Image (spheres, rainbow, N blue to C red):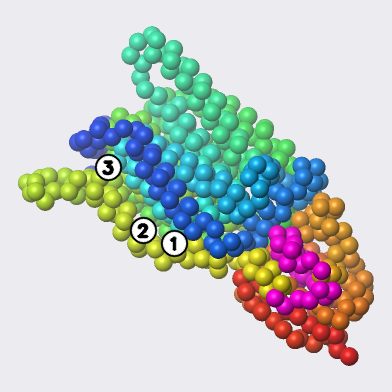
Amino acid sequence: MPVDLDSGATAAMGRRAIQPPAGAHRWPGWVVTAVPALLALALSLWGLLRQGAIWRDEAATWTTAERSLPEIGHLLEHVDVVHGLYYLLIHAIFEVFGPSVTAMRLPSVVGMVIAAAATAAIGRRLAGPMGGLSAGLVLALLPAMQRYAQEGRSFTLVAALVAVATRLLVGAVCPPEPTNARDGRVRRLAWGWRWGGYTAAMLGAALLNWLSLFALAAHGVTVVIAHRTGQRPLSARWLVSALVVASGTLPLILASRPQAGQVAWIRPASASSLLGVTVMLVVSLACARIPRREGTGLSQVQVGLSLLAVPQLGLLLASWLVQPLYADRYVLFSYIGLSLLVGPAVAWAVRTAESHGRASGRRRRRVRGEFLLAGVVAVAFVALLPLELGLRSPTSRTDDVRAAATEVTALARPGDGIVFVPDQRRDAALVTPSAFRGLDDVALVQSPFASGTLYGIEAAPARIRAAMLAHKRIVLVTDGAGSGTSGSSASSSRRDLVKRTVLARHFTLIASADTGGRRVTVYERVK
C-alpha cells in the first residue's frame, strides 16, 4: 500500500490514509488513558523497594531532603541547584510521611503513571483510540521508563510534565471546529487555558531539569511543520510561551553554570549510546511509514519524531560542542516521542490482522483487535521479563549505600577510625548513621550540614595522616571492583592518595568484604 508521510499533502500526492477502525467509537476516552496508566502503576509498584537498596544518586536525594529548609538553601548555593525544586518536593513528602524508600520513590511512580496516560491521550488525538492505547502501553513497557519510575530522582516527573504539555500543544494546534457562536467562545476560552497550561507545564519541567528545554525546541519544530503543511499558524502563540519558559528558566541556568563540575563524571558518548540512538531513530522512521488517519491535523509523526530526535540529537551535539553531557535519563522524555511512533504502528498491525480475519469470513475464529493487542503486550512483557527482573534486583544499580553500611556494622568496632575514598562514599554514613555510630570519621573537619555540601569538608592531607596514625584500626569504605566513581577534585585526589599511602605503609589488612558495588576493608596498625 502506498504510504502517506505528510498528512497535509495527502490529496496532492494521491495517497490514501486509513480510516479509524470499525467500532473504535465505542471506546470511551477514559479507557484509552486508564489502561496504560494502570499498567504503568502496576509495573512501577512491582519490586519498588528493591529490598531497601539505595544507590548513590538516590542517597543525594535522601540526605538533602532530610535537611531543614535553611540547610537545603545553603546546600544549593554550592551544589545541586539544578535539582533544588525536586529536593524541596521530597523534603515536603518526608515532612508529611517520614523518610522512607517508598516515600522517596512514589513521586516517580506518579510521574510514570501520568506520562503513560498523557501519552495515550496524545496518541488517541493523533492516531485514534487503538493508536493511543498502544502508545501508552509501549511507554509503560519501555525498560528505561520502568527503571526511572523506581528511583528517587526527578526524571519521570519531567517526562510527565512534557507529556502533559505535548497533549495541550496538540489540542491548541488541532482544536475541534465550532458549530455555533457559543462553541466559538468556548473554544477561544479553551485555547487560553491550553496555552496557559502548556506554558506552566513546560516551565515546571524546565525547573526540574532545564535540559527539558530540548522538548520545547521539539515542540517548536512541530509548530513550524504544522504551519508549513497549511494548518493553523500558531507560531506567535508558541513563541510567547517559549519566551516565558526560557525567561523563567534562565536564572536557574545561570546559577547552575558555576556548578558545572558536578557533571565532570560524564564521559563522551560511547559507541553503545550512539548505536542506541541510531536504532531508535531507524525504528521510528520505519514506524513513520505506516498509513495514517484522515482529518487529524497534526500526525503522530510530526509530533513524535520531533520529540524523539530533537532532544536526543541535540544533547549529543551539545556534548560534542560544549562538554560531555549525554546521559539517557536527562532526555528520558524523548521516549514519549518513540512511543507515539511505535504505538500506532503496533495498532496498525493489529487492525490489519483483524481486518484480514474479517475478510477471510472465518467469523468463529476471528479475534477482536483489543484481544490481539493484549496478546502483543503479554508477549512483549514475557520477552522483557529477564530485564525487568534485573531492574528490580538490589544489584541492578551502580551501588547500594545500605549494603555498605551493613558490612561496616559487621566488621567495625567502637572507637575505630573510618575513612572514605573518595569522600562521596560518605553517603553511606549519611543515609544510615546508626551503622557508623561510635566510629571516628578521621578526615572530616566540617559536616555536610554545616558546610552546605553533600559530603562535608575534609582536612588537609597532613592532618588526615596524623589522625589516621592515632588509631589502632581503620575502616576503609570505597568503591568495589568495576564500580564507577564520580568525578573528584584534584584536592580530593591528594587526600585520597594520602589515605591509601598511610594504610599501605603503616597498616595491615585483616578483613574485607565486597557488597553492593562497595568495598569495606578493615586495617590494623603495624606494631
| Residue 119 horizontal/vertical position (percent) | 42, 41
Residue at x-position 40% and y-position 24%: 175
Instruction: Give the mark nearer the N terminus: 3 vs 1.
Output: 3
Question: Taking 316 as reference, is 215 above or below it?
Answer: above
Residue at far left of view: 361
Question: Taking 437 as reference, is 66 above or below it?
Answer: above
Are dots 2 and 1 in contact, CB under 8 Å?
Answer: yes
**Residue on which disc 2 sits:** 381
- Of badges 3 and 2, the one in the foreground is 2
Q: Which stretch appears magenta?
A: 410-438
Question: Taking 101 as reference, is 485 above or below it?
Answer: below
| Residue 196 horizontal/vertical position (percent) | 55, 25
Query: Which structural element holds mark 3?
Result: loop
Instruction: Give the mark nearer the N terminus: 2 vs 1.
Output: 2
**Amino acid type, residue under disc 1 in the picture:** Glu
**Residue on which disc 3 sits:** 291
Instruction: Give the mark nearer the N terminus: 3 vs 2.
Output: 3
**Amino acid type, residue under disc 2 in the picture:** Phe
**Residue on which disc 1 sits:** 388
Residue at x-position 29% and y-position 41%: 130
Instruction: Check disc 3: other Cα within 10 Å, few if <14, some if 14-19, many if 20+.
Output: many
Viewer-side residue, 243 vs 414: 414
Marks 3 and 2, how far apart in space? 27 Å
Marks 3 and 1, how far apart in space? 32 Å
Report the side of 367 relative to 296 (left or right).
Answer: left
Q: Quadrant of the C terminus?
A: bottom right
Tell me the quarter of the picture where residue 121 sits.
top left
| Residue 463 horizontal/vertical position (percent) | 92, 71
**Amino acid type, residue under disc 3 in the picture:** Pro
| Residue 148 horizontal/vertical position (percent) | 53, 54
